Amino acid sequence: MPFVRGNSMRGLIITAAALSALSLAACGGMSMPFSKSSKVKAPSDNAAAIGVNGYLWRATLDTLSFMPLQSADPYGGVIVTDWYTNPEKPDERFKCTVYILDSRLRADGLNVAVFKQRRDLIVSMLKQSKGLRCPRPEGAFYVYPSCAGAIGKKTPEGKTIANDTDFVNYLLESEGISVVQGSAFGQGPAFRISYATATDLLEEAGRRIQRACAALI
């Protein structure tokens, strides 16, 4: 399932604001070109060397230094971090993509996208679903809830749920939820669901799964 831009925690919002503040500070720190004492020093990795504004490039790397770096393109001006987990909230992890827009030093010269994954939300909702058990995963971005409690039950249409393949087909037909049977990964009877998506989509998926489970006879 796709990651969704814009789901940011407070700390990363502060990070994005800090990037903008740094760009403003850099602008404010430049001397006026017609002043006798004016002298603007270009950074060693300025636009001529890296393709984007050197001040914004360095400020972005410095501000995001607490997150592991996945890639940095000094010519295209794109910096991508790897996943970062706040020790105080281990159920969430985040990554950032920063676009430096051009070689000019502008207050609006950055575009910051933040991606977020939620784990405990979907685990809690699955545990509340009739007939399901959901162990809490460690480190992965998907969960394998057991549907053993649904095996042998009948759908409202009278079909018997004989295995996890029947169960995932039932979710798809009744609620439009597409998941993969756990038996395909040696985890049956279970199914796999990714939580690498937006919180509102996870909540909606959880509600539909709860409704489908409650309808089994």
Image (spheres, helix red, strand yellow):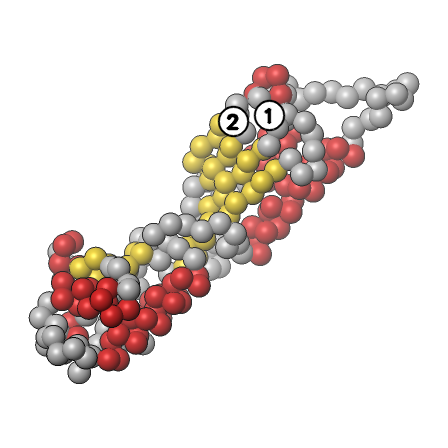
Contact (Cβ within 8 Å) of mark 1 with mark 2: yes
Q: Position of residue 152 (x, y in %)?
A: 10, 76
Look at the numbered disc 1 and give the secondary structure of its residue: loop
Identify the residue at horizontal 52%, vertical 52% (top origin): 6
Which residue in the structure is indicated by mark 2?
76
Q: Position of residue 166 (x, y in %)?
A: 13, 66
Q: Looking at the image, can residue 164 be seen? A: no
Which residue in the structure is indicated by mark 1?
52
Look at the numbered disc 2 and give the secondary structure of its residue: loop
Q: Looking at the image, can residue 26 be seen? A: yes
Q: Residue furthest right?
A: 36
Corner quadrant of residue 142:
bottom left
Say if 135 sits above or below 92 in the image. Answer: below
Q: Position of residue 139 (x, y in %)?
A: 33, 53
Circle 1 crowding by C-alpha within 10 Å: few under 14, some 14–19, many from 20? many
Residue 65 versus residue 71: which sits nearer the camera?
71
Amino acid bearing label 1:
Val
Q: Position of residue 34 (x, y in %)?
A: 88, 21
Residue 216 versus residue 90: which sits nearer the camera?
216
Identify the residue at horizontal 15%, vertical 72% (top origin): 148
